[in-house]
């Protein structure tokens, strides 16, 4: 993994010197978990799982008091999720371990959506090589929808690494292909109906398809797309499933749309018996492909759709899936 040497002040103190957007509006002294705290804890949980740190006991969580969240409540919430996390004070003592630091939280205009910027840092090089060798491993922003009475939902993740990093695009992928980033109802449906299947990951793609996937902006999990695929005001979730242990055999393309309460309607919109390593999905704006006149003509009232890309050398094909007249339709594209 490519690494960047940082001065100690940048690694250890960055979360205390940044200027968060949210602060006084939320009561950090309360041990109750507010929506802001729930969104923050959810982003930290995703960061830990995305980097496969669930079983490590040296992971610390760094939170500035100015963020306006209760550290005790967030650590308790992460503990309930079976994560063995510590306060950042433990990592700073030696220094030692890995730190998941929440740098800032921005609440969007709809008041239920939060942009949580998170950095993953490694303290161990400081103890081995001195105060100037802390390592920044990853930096990015989680956009989370968190409403009262509903579980937090991931809207998107975007990597924010410094330009001088020079990382390969594949190294900057979010790593959010784990089932944990999906709402609980969807997770349960996948386990119940597709127990022998898994979400398509970058490592499952063949060389040609991997290169094609890397060209997408922003770079996201090739097996998950999240967006306003139905005209409900709430995000829908598209997943591309491949068989476990035999990722190139068959695939299933499934879209979950929100219904009343925390439940989702499941629709299998495409499937195949072979060539799964050629496929990936990506959320897009409908306006990229249909102008306003065309959207009115075809009764397309949603703002986003899903691309299903088949990057096979001899059968290259891209289909746009979109919601229209109570069903998902698809249109081949020159893309």
Image (tube, helix red, strand yellow):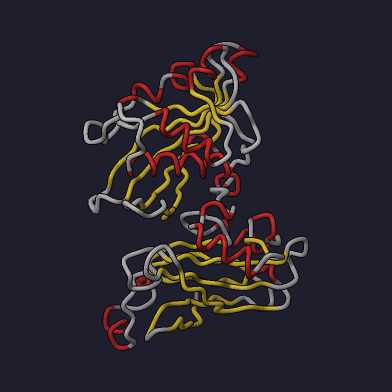
Q: Residue at x 42, y 46 (%)?
A: 142
Q: Position of residue 215 (x, y in %)?
A: 53, 58
Q: Position of residue 198 (x, y in %)?
A: 66, 61
Q: Is residue 129 left or right of residue 74?
A: right
Does residue 28 sit above or below 300 in this rendering?
above
Count of numbered circles on the image: 0
Q: Position of residue 45 (x, y in %)?
A: 51, 41
Does residue 303 sit above or below 165 in this rendering?
below
Q: Is residue 311 left or right of residue 100?
A: right
Q: Residue at x 48, y 22 (%)?
A: 11
Q: Residue at x 59, y 30 (%)?
A: 3
Location of the N terminus by quadrant is top right
Residue 209 or residue 190, whichever sits in front: 190
Does residue 47 sit above or below 239 in this rendering?
above
The answer to which quarter of the image holds residue 241 is bottom right
Residue 145 or residue 304, whichever sits in front: 145
In the orientation shown, which residue stands out farthest toward the right? 245
Q: Position of residue 170 (x, y in %)?
A: 60, 49
Residue 236 or residue 120, whichever sits in front: 236
Does residue 19 sit above or below 52 in this rendering?
above
């Amino acid at each position: 993994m490519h690494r960047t040497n940082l001065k100690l002040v940048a690694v250890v103190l960055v979360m205390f010197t940044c200027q968060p957007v949210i602060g006084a509006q939320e009561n950090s002294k309360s041990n109750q978990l507010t929506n802001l705290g729930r969104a923050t804890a959810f982003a930290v949980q995703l960061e830990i799982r995305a980097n496969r740190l669930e079983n490590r006991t040296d992971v610390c969580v760094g939170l500035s008091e100015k963020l306006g969240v209760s550290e005790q409540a967030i650590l308790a919430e992460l503990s309930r999720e079976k994560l063995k996390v510590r306060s950042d004070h433990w990592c700073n003592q030696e220094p030692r371990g890995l730190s998941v630091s929440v740098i800032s939280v921005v609440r969007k205009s709809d008041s239920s959506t939060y942009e949580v910027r998170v950095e993953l840092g490694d303290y161990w090089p400081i103890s081995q090589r001195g105060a100037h060798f802390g390592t920044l491993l990853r930096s990015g922003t989680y956009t989370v929808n968190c409403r009262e009475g509903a579980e937090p939902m991931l809207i998107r993740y975007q990597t924010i690494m410094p330009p001088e990093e020079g990382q390969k695009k594949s190294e900057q992928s979010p790593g959010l292909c784990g089932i944990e980033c999906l709402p609980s109802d969807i997770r349960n449906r996948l386990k119940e109906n597709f127990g022998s299947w898994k979400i398509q990951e970058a490592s499952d793609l063949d060389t040609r398809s991997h290169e094609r996937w890397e060209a997408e902006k922003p770079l996201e999990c090739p097996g998950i797309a999240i967006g306003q695929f139905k005209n409900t005001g709430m995000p829908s979730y598209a997943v591309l499933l491949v068989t476990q242990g035999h990722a190139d055999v068959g695939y299933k393309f499934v879209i979950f749309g929100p219904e009343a309460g925390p439940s989702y309607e499941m629709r299998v919109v495409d499937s195949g018996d072979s060539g799964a390593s050629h496929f990936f999905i990506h959320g897009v704006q409908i306006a990229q492909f249909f102008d306003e006149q065309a959207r009115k003509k075809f009764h397309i009232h949603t703002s986003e759709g899903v691309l299903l890309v088949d990057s096979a050398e001899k059968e290259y094909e891209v289909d746009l899936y979109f919601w229209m007249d109570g069903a998902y339709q698809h249109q081949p594209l020159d893309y």
